[in-house]
Image (cartoon, rainbow, N blue to C red):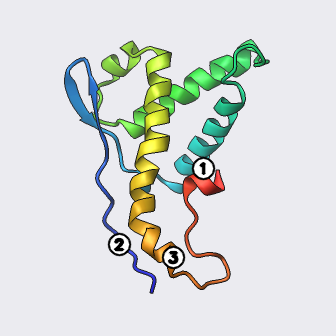
């Protein structure tokens, strides 16, 4: 049986300079945001190894801007001046934490559904499996 809830799951707390903020829950992202975040994560993974990365200055600037946008969407409660002070390595950690921690909570809640799925589309596909 397919069970659907309109309530979003709880987010993950994160500490910035001793202040606690909560990441949005994975299921609260708009589809476009989810898609763009997945695309960004896939692109970032390709260029993680700096020895083989071949990024132009424009591509680096674009990725920095994407980090800023996604961090603001993931942590909407963080004041802009504080988020602006967070360095890009920390922003990458925020994205990685969101991508690895929050989807697991969603997967746990759908694990039983996946086991009992008999549909031709395999029912639910996690973000990590489809990414």
Q: Position of residue 28 (x, y in %)?
A: 40, 54
> Which disc number belongs to residue 115?
3
Q: Nearer the viewer, mark 1 or mark 3?
A: 3
Local SS, label 2: loop
> Which disc number belongs to residue 35?
1
Distance between the Cα atoms at labels 1 and 3?
25 Å
Q: Position of residue 14 (x, y in %)?
A: 29, 32
> Which disc number belongs to residue 5?
2
Would you place residue 93 above or below residue 39 in this image? above
Q: What crowding class fits label 3: few (fewer than 14 Cα within 10 Å), some (14-19), or many (20 or more)?
A: few
**Is 81 left or right of 27, judged from the image as shown?**
left
Q: Which residue is painted at 20% across and 20% down in the image?
A: 18
Q: Position of residue 69 (x, y in %)?
A: 49, 31
Q: What crowding class fits label 2: few (fewer than 14 Cα within 10 Å), some (14-19), or many (20 or more)?
A: few
**Is 111 left or right of 66, judged from the image as shown?**
left
Q: Quadrant location of residue 63? A: top right
Q: Which residue is painted at 43% across and 20% down in the image?
A: 90
Location of the N terminus (image quadrant): bottom left
């Amino acid at each position: 049986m397919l069970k659907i809830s309109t309530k979003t799951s709880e987010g993950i707390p994160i500490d910035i300079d001793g202040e606690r903020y909560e990441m949005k829950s994975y299921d609260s992202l708009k589809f476009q945001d989810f898609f763009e975040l997945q695309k960004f994560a896939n692109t970032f993974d390709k260029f993680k190894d700096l020895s083989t990365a071949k990024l132009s200055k424009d591509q680096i600037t674009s990725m920095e801007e994407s980090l800023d946008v996604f961090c603001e969407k993931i942590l909407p409660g963080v004041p802009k001046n504080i988020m602006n002070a967070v360095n890009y390595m920390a922003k990458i950690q925020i994205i990685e934490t969101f991508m690895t921690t929050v989807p697991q909570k969603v997967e746990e809640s759908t694990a039983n559904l996946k086991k009992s799925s008999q549909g031709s589309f395999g029912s639910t596909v996690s973000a990590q499996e489809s990414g």
